[in-house]
Each structure stands twice: as structure tokens, then as C-alpha cells.
Amino acid sequence: MTRAVRYIAARTLDTAPVKSLPPGPGEVEVAPAYVGICGTDLHIFHGDMDARVHAPAVLGHEMSGRVVRVGPDTEGWQPGDAVTVMPLRWDGTCPACRAGHRHICQHLDFIGIDSPGAMQQRWTVPAATLLRLPDSVPLDRAALVEPTAVAVHDVGRAEVRGGERVVVVGGGPVGLLIALVARTVGAEVRVVELSAHRRLLAGKLGLATWDPAEQNVPELVREWTGDAGADVAFEVSGAAAGMDTAVEVLGVRGRLCLVAIHPQHREVNLHRFFWRELTLVGARLYDRSDFERAVTLVADGTIPAEQLISKVVPLAEAPSAFEALESGGDVMKILVDCTDEAEEAAV
């Protein structure tokens, strides 16, 4: 048995023993060290994904850890290896897979949503999902590889180029990671965020910010760009007002990259899309090259992961950590420490 954080019903989590499955052929058992709580996890917590998540469900997909056991006919891994997991299983046969888009397989198993996730002390996964971590990277920082891979994919989908003006609407963890990754390709970036705490952190990371409650963001963009408008906008807030801002700031033939999950239908200014010949692209997950790039960015310090981690809690305190994130407050990224030692200390 292994202890895990489980989704039971809307706004109800527990920590309980669950059966630990030994690794079969092509599988590896991992001891998760740190697991991040992300926006998707909060959507699950709110009950927004009950049609897809079947309770009781073990949560978590942003992780780092070490290999514990290797299943039969599984090569290249041994106990003690530091790893992260790209939590995707595709069928390889659907039209999306056959077209080369396996990461958005039409029958995708997103591990941690559609099947048991990483927020447990032992976790058996396909060896094909593993990526090796450099020994020099602390495992707490390595837990941010997955959201960094999201940002790498988003910046790639938007085709951001050096010298372009980029507006990121929403300065949460993924928004700041998008801003940092866009900066690595030479873009000029502004972050739009309501939270003073998040704007302060963005400033410490060298990112310029605007407060949409106190400032006229479209007017600021016009001044910044000489009335041209932004080349790219990322909508990462998940709010109707955020979508409006992302559309409004774009210049002629600007690209809007939709990153946030919008559970409700949104009204969008389609006349603006027509008048300025705008482009809307969706960005959902990532592929292996995005993950490999993310490992490098975290490992070499380009992504200052340690500055994005607000708090680390033992597994037993994970339910209260979800409540803390839900309430807003001065937090960015909370990690759950799944190690046996952390659990023993909590008890």
C-alpha cells in the first residue's frame, strides 16, 4: 500500500492508503519526491471536471522523483535514477496520432486526470513517459519541469520571434513561465496581472507588469508599440475580462494564444479578428521535445524555479494547500512533499 491524495467530490480531498501496483513489462515504479499543484488540479478540486475524473482519483502530474523498481523487459533505467514524467499516454491509432499529433490524441490518457497521478508515495508508470533529470538539479526545482514544458509549447505554438512585443494576460505560474520562455527567444514582454503579490514576484524576475485594475492596458500597449499593437498575446487568466484584453491589445495580424482553461463559453470580439486579420491558436499540452527543452531551462537556471516555489507541504497537508491556493493570497506554486520522511515528520 502507498499513501495518496485523492479527489472524492467537489471541494473534498482526502489522504488514504491505496494499492501500490508492481511494475509490469515496460513499466517503472517511481517514488515521487515533489508534486506541484496546478490550475488543472484546482479545476478538478472545484468539481469542474467530474465528467472526466472518476472519484476516488489520485491527483498530480507536475512531479520529480526517483526510480524504485524496474519492470521486466524494461531497459535504460535503474533504481536511484532521478526522473520526471511526461504524463501522457496515447493510442497511436486515432486520426490525431496518425497525423503526428500524439500529444492531443483523441483518446488521450492524461495521467493524473484520466488515470492515477503522482501525488502518492509510490507510482507505477510506463517507462516511455520518463525523462532523466541531471543530478545537479534539486528535485524540488525539477517539479517545475512540467509547467515549463507547457510554456515552451505555448511559445512555440504562438511562433514568438526575437524582437516581437508580447503581452501575457495572467501572471500565475504558467503565465510567468511563458513570459520567461518568450524572453529567451528575444521577445519584449509585458505581464498583465491583478495580484500585487504576483506582480512583485514578476518584477523580481525582471519582468515588467501592468495592473489592469489601475491602468488602461490597451492604451499602454499603444504607447509601448508606437500605436502598432502587440505581435502576440497569451490568455492565461481564464477570465472573460482577460480574453477581452488579450484581443484588444493585438496589432494587425497579431496572434492570440489561448492557454487558460475556460469552463464557460466566452463572448469574443470577432469583428476585431476580422478587422485586424488576427489569428487564434489553442495550446493544450506538449510533446517530448518541449519537455527536453524544459529540463534544460530548469537545469541551467534560465527558469529560476526556486523563486516560483512559495511553499512545500507534506502529503498529509495537501488538502489544506488546495484551499490556500483557491483563496488566492500571497502564493505562487505549492509543492507537495511525497517522501516517506516528510510523511513521518507530519505524523
Image: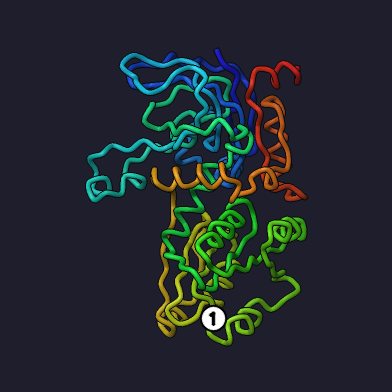
Position of 130 compared to 171: left or right? Answer: left
Q: Nearer the viewer, residue 193 or 288?
A: 288
Position of 123 compared to 25: left or right? Answer: right
Crowdedness of circle 1 by 10 Å Cα count: few (<14), some, many (20+)? Answer: many
Q: Nearer the viewer, residue 132 or 68?
A: 132
Q: Can residue 263 be seen?
A: no
Q: Residue at x 46, y 68 (%)?
A: 161
Disc 1: which residue: 229
Q: Nearer the viewer, residue 206 or 62?
A: 206
Q: Quadrant of the C terminus?
A: top right
**Residue 21 pos. (x, y %):** 45, 15
Vertically, is 64 above or below 160? above
**Residue 218 pos. (x, y %):** 62, 79
**Residue 326 pos. (x, y %):** 69, 46
Q: Residue at x 44, y 18 (%)?
A: 78
**Residue 107 pos. (x, y %):** 32, 41
Q: Residue furthest bottom?
A: 227
Q: Nearer the viewer, residue 23 or 322?
A: 23
As helix, strand or loop, the secondary structure at mark 1 comes to: loop
Q: Can residue 279 be seen?
A: yes
Vertically, is 42 above or below 204? above
